[in-house]
Image (cartoon, rainbow, N blue to C red):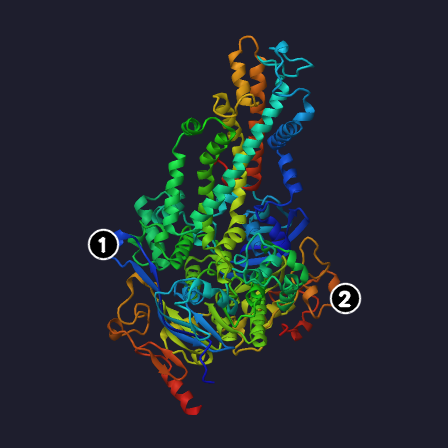
């Protein structure tokens, strides 16, 4: 077999071009569905201002409890606010928190994981202890404690999510860093006099980051659910800011007469969760089937 | 010349910790000596080869010289400086003077960097980004005989021989005086091995380099090394001029290694020195001469008395009953 | 009688860049009781050949022509999965470069050797006795005690010897050994070669021995084939090939082996040029791009020229090739 052919027969572990990735995702039915849902949700959130003709916080007591109509696509709530525009703007907040919190967790998790894996043994042990301690807290307990201390806020939600997800990311990065620490290309960099920062950033991080990006994409729906849950309990986004969780809460109070409020709050959560989950799973299967069964 | 050799290693020792507290309490040894008192020197422009089976400590020795592995005892002098007690900051400029090539041609290149980035890296690390990095990359590619468009390739797109050339190019990037090469021909096809050895020989001659080669391939040693040492259980059992050792090995282990090379001639009659038994564990070094458990010529004395290093002609060895002593005497009287 | 008779075998792989012809008109005969060597450098098609014989071609690979006759009966190229599985491990055994491929790390060696004999109806005790006898044959000291040990308790050389013992346990008629000594030190390598030779004679099986190490082939094999870019460019007895090679590639390959140089050379011989892309095979001779004596006639497919009884080279210039040496 020629060398070129041998090269092409190697398992695909590199991220490759974006076009190629998209093609492979679209080839899987679930992947295509997931990607479409995600694009749809992101599009709606991005252009929330253009797509809805009402301000999400505008009260209109005359229009209370309107069912869905051409005027109010998803109806109105107990304060007469247009639910469609609340859902779109709530989506903005949900996605911003999900992406922001996941991004922050990724950065912190990667840095801590690299340090634990590459640093001295005692530091590694100490950090492992810390990760395990954090992981052993139930999410809701952690959230309640934090909110009791600081009061409900967007920041509190983000901090809870970061605290909950960092240990998992850091552990995966740490394990892979430990393996790469004695790899020949890392030894070669050391023998050239490369600094520790350089070794971590150039020679280790690009090789350990792949699986974690896939896991993070599968964690986004979890964060969306956490945000909605906390807001539902009144511990997250503060009214009058719209949130899928608080819309749900409003709906539950009036579920007997106005079922559409619960639908307006629940539907986007379901769609977003399914979309990101399908997309994440397809990404995982495409890039790293070994991760199957995790996350 | 009376000046100091480029590299002088004396009585170098490297230990690895083994087991935990429990092993220590139960009286088992808690460390092994992977390199156990090794001495040699390397002159400028010369090539020295370390030979031995896997586990003999040759790679550990090389890594200790390169500062990747802490030494537990002895001294390493390079360009007149003792390397064992210099700080990490002082090491950095030395890394321009001494570079190392690792065993796996492809694996020693960072998988997500292009050949261009790989070759530019030594300059970036040593703050030489003022130099035109692109020009340097092209110069290095030309030096090792790779076309310019290879700069855009990634390690997984290279064959073993091509990757090895990139490794050589990176090793010579900063004009070092010493290159340590760990198994430079491992995993390469025969026709490519020759290319790589020719390249290393050329560069040595053109740049006045010294080479420290680690290999288990004796044919490679013969083609490239001026002098050599044979390692067994972390010690030299024989060292000296390559030609002399190939002509008349004195230590039975050296003789066994030389005779173990299958030669490409179906009619060749082999007078092999078979080595029975397994390599002993470093945790339980044999008494007396450490080779006696596998030596076909061992006598009673070998199991109890450790032999002292003996010099004969151009080689130094540790054996009570050396081989080929007549050949040596004959050589001495005629030459 | 021939144990394995490969005739006109071609194997294609479907790849993204087009069809890749990995084997082209391969001819190979393994007579009973003989050791046949396969030499060639990376990319020559050695692995594809073994996989084709074992019926283990990847999904995108297919046999496009030829047959693989086993014991003058079954055609392995067109055998169904079940029939192939019945042959593998019993009539055709394999030993690979990494012995751990054959050994299960979580089962004791004794258990694994007993499992191989699952078809035999003798008692467990008798099976163990046969395992012990086999381990003794491959010179594992204290085989009775060793039966209860796990693979990781053995050194690399011993693991390979156990893998050989397991392969030969069922007394196969063909042993395929794929670079079994490559990962071993030279001193171990020669003991394994000697062992293989001895066992082959005792059991009376044939061996197809794949190696890139010319010295090992010279020492072990009776006959050999030389492969380049998916073709058998030359085949004959080991003596024919080493003393009277006629294909320019064989001659260059032999000249490259540093073991043939008795003194230190100023420059080591190499083979300039690179392997052709097998998706775009050159027309005619596959080696012509790297061959100094290639001329116009080489643009058409060279015949398998018979040089002597059993010595064949796929070249137009088998007599001129004598003057060719590897470039120094």
Which class describes the residues within 10 Å of circle 2: few (<14), some (14-19), or many (20+)?
few
Q: Given the image, what chain letter belongs to the residue carrying mark 2?
A: C
Drawn side of residue A210 relative to residue B231, left or right: right
Count all numbered tags in the image, as a single digit: 2
Seen in the picture, residue C33 relative to B260 is either above or below; the reply is above
Location of residue B162 in the rendering, given as x and y in whole percent from the top left corner: 60, 62
Looking at the picture, how far across and down is residue B39, in whole percent? 38, 74
Quadrant of res A147:
top left
As drawn, the label of residue C196 is none
Mark carried by residue B26? 1
User: In terms of depth relative to the viewer, which is nearer, B266 or A105?
Assistant: A105
In screen coordinates, is B22 left or right of A51?
Answer: left
Instruction: Report which quarter residue C141 is drawn in.
Output: bottom left
Q: CA distance from mark 2 to mark 1?
A: 78 Å
Task: Tell me where residue B18 sits by quadrant.
Answer: bottom left
For the C terminus of chain B, give its image quadrant: bottom left
Q: Is residue B272 visible?
A: no
Query: Can residue B206 be seen in the rendering of this structure?
Result: yes
- The residue carrying mark 2 is C296
- Residue at 33 percent of width and 55 percent of height: C133
- Residue in the image at 62% along x and 56% along y: A3
In the displayed structure, A289 sits above or below A151; it is below
Give x and y (percent) for residue C102.
Answer: 44, 50
Per the image, label 2 sits on a secondary structure element best described as helix
Residue A59 % position (x, y): 61, 15
């Amino acid at each position: 077999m020629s060398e070129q052919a041998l090269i092409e027969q190697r398992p695909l572990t590199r991220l490759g071009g974006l076009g190629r990735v998209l093609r492979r995702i679209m080839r899987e039915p679930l992947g295509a569905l997931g990607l479409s849902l995600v694009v749809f949700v992101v599009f709606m959130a991005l252009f929330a201002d253009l797509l809805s003709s009402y301000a999400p916080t505008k009260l209109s007591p005359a229009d209370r409890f309107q069912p869905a109509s051409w005027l109010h696509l998803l109806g109105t709530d107990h304060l007469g606010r247009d639910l469609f525009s609340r859902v779109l703007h709530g989506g903005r907040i949900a996605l911003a928190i999900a992406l922001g919190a996941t991004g922050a967790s990724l950065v912190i998790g990667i840095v801590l994981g690299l340090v634990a894996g590459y640093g001295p043994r005692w530091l590694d042990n100490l950090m492992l202890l810390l990760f395990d301690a954090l992981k052993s807290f139930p999410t809701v307990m952690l959230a309640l404690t934090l909110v009791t201390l600081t009061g409900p806020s967007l920041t509190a939600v983000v901090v809870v999510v970061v605290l909950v997800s960092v240990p998992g990311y850091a552990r995966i990065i740490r394990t892979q860093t430990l393996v790469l620490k004695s790899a020949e290309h890392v030894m070669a960099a050391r023998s050239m006099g490369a600094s520790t920062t350089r070794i971590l950033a150039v020679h280790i991080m690009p090789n350990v980051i792949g699986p974690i990006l896939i896991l993070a994409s599968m964690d986004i729906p979890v964060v969306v659910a956490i945000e909605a849950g906390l807001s539902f309990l009144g511990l997250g986004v503060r009214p009058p800011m719209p949130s899928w969780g608080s819309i749900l809460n409003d709906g539950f109070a009036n579920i007997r007469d106005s079922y559409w409020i619960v639908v307006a709050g629940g539907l986007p959560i379901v769609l977003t969760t399914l979309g990101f989950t399908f997309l994440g799973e397809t990404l995982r299967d495409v890039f790293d089937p070994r991760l199957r069964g995790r996350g | 010349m009376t000046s100091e050799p480029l590299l002088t290693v004396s009585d170098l020792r490297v230990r690895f910790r083994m087991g935990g507290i429990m092993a220590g309490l139960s009286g088992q040894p808690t460390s092994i000596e992977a390199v156990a008192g090794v001495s040699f020197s390397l002159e400028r422009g010369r090539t020295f080869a370390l030979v031995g089976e896997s586990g003999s400590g040759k790679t550990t020795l090389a890594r200790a010289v390169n500062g990747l592995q802490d030494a537990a005892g002895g001294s390493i002098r390079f360009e007149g400086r003792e390397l064992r007690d210099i700080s990490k900051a002082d090491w950095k400029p030395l890394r321009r003077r001494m570079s190392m090539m690792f065993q796996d041609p492809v694996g020693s290149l960072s998988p997500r960097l292009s050949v261009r980035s790989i070759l530019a890296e030594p300059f970036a690390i040593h703050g030489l980004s003022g130099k035109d990095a692109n020009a340097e990359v092209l110069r290095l590619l030309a030096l090792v005989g790779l076309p310019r468009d290879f700069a855009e390739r990634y390690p997984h797109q290279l064959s073993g021989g091509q990757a090895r050339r990139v490794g050589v190019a990176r090793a010579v990037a900063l004009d070092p005086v010493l290159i340590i090469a760990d198994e430079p021909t491992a995993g390469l096809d025969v026709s490519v091995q020759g290319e790589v050895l020719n390249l290393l020989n050329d560069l040595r001659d053109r740049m006045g380099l010294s080479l420290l080669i680690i290999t288990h391939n004796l044919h490679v040693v013969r083609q490239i090394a001026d002098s050599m040492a044979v390692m067994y259980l972390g010690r030299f059992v024989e060292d000296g001029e390559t030609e002399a050792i190939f002509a008349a090995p004195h230590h039975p282990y050296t003789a066994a290694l030389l005779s173990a090379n299958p030669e490409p001639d179906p009619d060749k009659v082999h007078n092999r020195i078979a080595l029975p038994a397994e390599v002993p564990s470093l945790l339980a070094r044999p008494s007396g001469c450490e080779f006696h458990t596998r030596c076909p010529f061992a006598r009673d004395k070998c199991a109890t008395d450790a032999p002292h290093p003996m010099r004969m002609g151009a080689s130094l060895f540790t054996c009570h009953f050396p081989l080929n002593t007549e050949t040596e005497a004959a050589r001495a009287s005629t030459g | 009688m021939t144990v394995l008779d490969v005739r006109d075998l071609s194997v294609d792989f479907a790849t993204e860049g087009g069809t890749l012809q990995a084997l082209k008109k391969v001819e190979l005969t393994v007579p009973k009781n003989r050791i046949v060597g396969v030499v060639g450098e990376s990319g020559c098609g050695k692995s594809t050949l073994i996989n084709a014989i074992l019926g283990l071609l990847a999904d995108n690979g297919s046999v496009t022509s030829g047959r693989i006759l086993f014991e003058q009966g079954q055609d392995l190229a067109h055998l169904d999965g079940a029939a192939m599985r019945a042959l593998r491990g019993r009539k055709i055994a394999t030993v690979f470069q990494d012995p751990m491929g054959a050994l299960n790390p979580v089962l004791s060696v004794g258990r694994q050797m007993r499992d191989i004999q699952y078809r035999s109806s003798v008692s467990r005790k008798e099976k163990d006795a046969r395992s012990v006898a086999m381990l003794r044959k491959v010179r594992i000291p204290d085989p009775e005690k060793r039966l209860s040990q796990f693979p990781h308790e053995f050194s690399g050389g011993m693991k390979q010897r156990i893998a050989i013992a397991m392969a030969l346990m069922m007394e196969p008629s063909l042993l395929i050994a794929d670079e079994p000594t490559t990962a071993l030190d030279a001193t171990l390598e020669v003991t394994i070669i000697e062992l293989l030779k001895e066992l082959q004679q005792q059991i009376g099986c044939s061996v197809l021995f794949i190696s890139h190490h010319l010295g090992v082939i010279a020492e072990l094999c009776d006959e050999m084939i030389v492969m380049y870019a998916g073709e058998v460019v030359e085949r004959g007895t080991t003596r024919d090939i080493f003393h009277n090679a006629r294909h320019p590639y064989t001659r260059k390959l032999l000249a490259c082996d540093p073991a043939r140089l008795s003194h230190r050379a100023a420059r080591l011989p190499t083979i300039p040029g690179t392997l052709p892309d097998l998706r775009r095979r050159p027309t005619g001779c596959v080696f012509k791009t790297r061959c100094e004596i290639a001329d116009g006639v080489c643009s058409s497919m060279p015949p398998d020229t018979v040089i002597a009884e059993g010595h064949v080279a796929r070249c137009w210039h088998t007599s001129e090739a004598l003057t060719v040496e590897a470039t120094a």
